[in-house]
Image (tube, grey):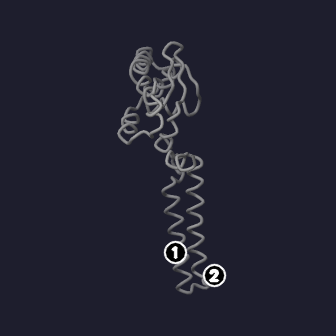
Amino acid sequence: MLESRERDRPLDRAEIHDVLSNDRRWRALELLADETPRDLRSLADDIAAAESGESPAPREVRQSVYVTLHQNHLPKLDSLGVVEYDDTSKQVDLGSRARELDVYLEVVERGDLSWSEYYLGVVVLGLVSTGASLAGTPVLASFDPYVYATGALVALLGSIALQIRQQGSPWFDRLTE
């Protein structure tokens, strides 16, 4: 259990890297983000199926995943406040600090845009339209170049606010408290 002063500080980079450097911990957090709380057995079965590529996974793989989750990974995540693990009932739930890892767990599907690609597109579009307006391009020159530049900045600001709202931000949460 975390002491109250430990809960007040955000996870540092080394802790985040350590948590996410293990595939089983990573998968456990992804599965818990989709369905929580979960019992250890179903969590282990799903991770074992992903690792083995078979459903259900072979018994030895399921047992190995179950034991390492129970003895190593879940207690570690629990000690950091990322999950809440009751080793008696074998129930696992996301902890108070799980949101700090959301941005690292975001998976962009093939063909979809990541936030960074979207931001790059907004900046390029803003620069091109502003430059075209300055150069006197017939359609784009009808508006002042400041309109395009301001529009791109407003789009960036709005997008960043949306992303922070969707994914959360420990830094922003501290500012608003």
* Residue at 59% in and 49% down: 165
The numbered dot on residue 128 is 1
* Residue at 49% in and 32% down: 29
Q: Residue furthest front?
A: 5
Residue 41 location in percent, x, y? 51, 17
The amino acid marked with disc number 1 is Val
Residue 149 location in percent, x, y? 56, 74
Residue 33 location in percent, x, y? 55, 34
The amino acid marked with disc number 2 is Phe
Mark 2 falls on what kind of element? loop
In the rendered view, tell whether residue 150 sits above or below residue 36: below
The numbered dot on residue 175 is none
- Which of 75 and 60 lies nearest the eye of the viewer? 75
Image quadrant in which you'd find residue 94: top right
Image quadrant in which you'd find residue 60: top left
Mark 1 falls on what kind of element? helix
Q: Residues within 10 Å of mark 1 (few under 14, many from 20)?
A: some
Numbered disc in front, either 1 or 2: 2
* Residue at 48% in and 21% down: 44
In the rendered view, tell whether residue 117 sits above or below residue 153: above
* Pointer 2 residue: 143
In the rendered view, tell whether residue 105 sits above or below residue 127: above
Q: Residues within 10 Å of mark 2 (few under 14, many from 20)?
A: some
